[in-house]
Amino acid sequence: MYKALTIAGSDSGGGAGIQADLKTFQELEVFGMSALTAVTAQNTLGVHGVYPMTVEAVSQQIKAIGEDMGTDAIKTGMLFNAEIIEAVSELLVTYQWKNVVVDPVMIAKGGASLLQQDAISALKKYLLPRALVITPNIPEAEVLTGMSIRTVHDKREAAMRLFDLGVKNIVLKGGHDEDPSESVDLLFDGKEFYTFSSKRISTKNTHGTGCTFSAAITAWLAKGLSVLEAVTKSKDFIQAAIEVEIKIGHGHGPTNHWA
Ligand code: PLP
């Protein structure tokens, strides 16, 4: 039985965060475990409240898993503050967990902050050097690299800068690109650049796509696939999930997990 652990925030609306991660693990037939970093009161209309867990509560959840069950891969999502980032990073070293996927969640689509401003430097200093894969969108990559990303050349430059921070594989997601017809993701493994294009779909049901995509990569890494294979399969998985619309709530709905 392959196992995956998500260290992330709860989305009461079930579209993003821990809920999206566990649903994705289950669909991909990987045993899902979780360590909650924060609870959000959230629905398709937005984030109505953010309630962080204590550092001790986060650490104890991870230790409970590390000391008994172990895991084949891990993803981090919403980590909220610098203290939680430092504690999580230390435990990744304690348990020698290698298949670490970091989704550097910063701001929800509705604008709510899911990471405190002063936590960015902790993310770069402690967590990124331990990441096998990072999956930033363009605004997140801009914050992490301090550069503006407009062109293909900029994307490559940003990926190289993230590699220099110690991340082994960078998946720069193109969902925020200005191109109206396609969305192009870039993977950089320190040597080669790979591009993954997909048709842009006109939908407002994209809540939780980033969480689902990084959870899918984590699940396939847990099953022993290479990073390139895991990213390729996850791109197809998320595209299928966005294509088949479901109608839940009055705002930005979740993606379809049964596509
Ligand atoms: N809420 C939580 C708890 C999350 O972890 C995430 C992840 O990015 C979001 C919300 C973001 O949701 P959205 O896809 O709407 O930006």
Image: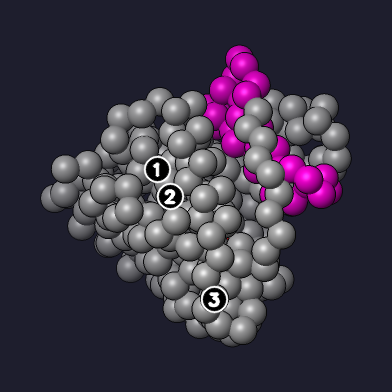
**Magenta-span inclusion, residue 183:** yes
Taking depth in this image into account, of 256 and 52 the one nearest to the observer is: 256
| Residue occupying the point 52% across, 70% down | 246
Query: Horizontal placement of 133 versus 175: left or right?
Result: left
Disc 2 secondary structure class: helix
| Residue occupying the point 71% across, 59% down | 202
**Where 161 falls versus 258 (above or below)?**
above
Q: Quadrant of the C terminus?
A: bottom left
Taking depth in this image into account, of 251 and 120 the one nearest to the observer is: 251
Q: CA distance from mark 1 to mark 3?
A: 27 Å
Query: Horizontal placement of 27 versus 192: left or right?
Result: left
Q: Where does the magenta region start and end?
A: 165-194
Q: Where is residue 137? Give x, y as percent.
A: 67, 48
Q: Which mark is residue 215?
A: 2
Amino acid on which disc 1 is placed: Thr
Q: Which mark is residue 218?
A: 1
Graded by Cα atoms within 10 Å as few (under 14), some (14 to 19) or many (20 or more), the crowding at tag 3 reads few
